[in-house]
Image (tube, rainbow, N blue to C red):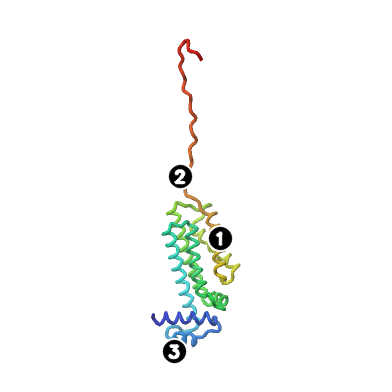
Amino acid sequence: MGPRTRILDAAMLVFRRHGFRRSSIEQAAEAAGLTRQALYHHFKSKEALFRAVIERLHEDALAAEIAAAAAAEKQDGSLADILVASVSAKLGQLAASLDGSPHVEELFSEHLLQARDLYQKYTTAYAEQLAATIARVCRKQGLTLDAGMTPRDLARCVEMAVNGTKSAYPAMQPADAFLKDLEIMLRTLVAGAVRPAFKSRAATPKPAKKAVPRSISRKPGDRR
């Protein structure tokens, strides 16, 4: 384990325990087994250290999203299954990183204050990854999106569903209840937005032809 990784692991523990405002460079250095000057060699301030921690959280969440989508696709999951798996993995990774901290809401708030540019950067990255997954799965499974919707449009709707569910669960807590309600939202969204691109001809039975009676020739003197 390199010094930077050790510092970030230690800083994560400190921020979880004390929140952002009450944490210090000295506490992070002590937790990492370094002097204050040694830590300053890697990070110039507490704010810079916090940003690095946030960036790693987002990188881990993005990796979890990609891996979960690939696993669900490999198991031949439906589009809804794949989206639920990937989005839940991403958000579950973020929630688990702060689970148990008494300062979860403060850390999320400081995340937006201290690293808004990172939030915007990864929001875009998540949306692009989700749109790519939707486009790929629709091609593979012969699906089409209704009402002229594009994969980017559906990805945006998924993000709005996430934000809507977050409004009912501040800081995504409790995580289990948050993810359960989010799954219901996502499955309902996909059910209304996606349909098969075409119907198989075999799926629509043709009406049976009526039998046409053959004319019977009669000889003179035959009884009717």
Residue drawn at (44%, 89%), measured in percent from left and top?
35
SS under mark 2: loop
Mark 3, residue position: 35
Callout 2 crowding tier (Cα within 10 Å): few <14, some 14–19, many ≥20: few
Type of the residue with mark 1: Ile
Q: Are marks 2 and 3 in contact (CB under 8 Å)?
A: no
Please state the horizontal and vertical placement of residue 51, each as a whole percent of the image. Answer: 49, 78
Please state the horizontal and vertical placement of residue 40, each as a whole percent of the image. Answer: 44, 86
- Where residue 167 sits, quadrant-wise, is bottom right
Which circle's residue, 1 or 3, is located before the other in the chain? 3
Type of the residue with mark 2: Ser
Outermost top residue: 221
Callout 3 crowding tier (Cα within 10 Å): few <14, some 14–19, many ≥20: some
Q: Is residue 162 left or right of residue 134?
A: right
Which circle's residue, 2 or 1, is located before the other in the chain? 1
Outermost front residue: 223
Q: CA distance from mark 2 to mark 1?
A: 30 Å
- Where residue 4 sits, quadrant-wise, is bottom left
Type of the residue with mark 3: Thr
Q: Is residue 56 left or right of residue 178?
A: left
| Nearer to us in this view, 208 or 94 | 208
Q: Is residue 216 above or below residue 182?
A: above
Mark 2, residue position: 200
Callout 1 crowding tier (Cα within 10 Å): few <14, some 14–19, many ≥20: few
Residue drawn at (49%, 86%), measured in percent from left and top?
27
SS under mark 3: loop
Please state the horizontal and vertical placement of residue 132, each as a whole percent of the image. Answer: 45, 60
| Nearer to us in this view, 101 or 39 | 101
Which circle's residue, 2 or 3, is located before the other in the chain? 3
Mark 1, residue position: 184
Please state the horizontal and vertical placement of residue 56, each as a whole percent of the image. Answer: 45, 75
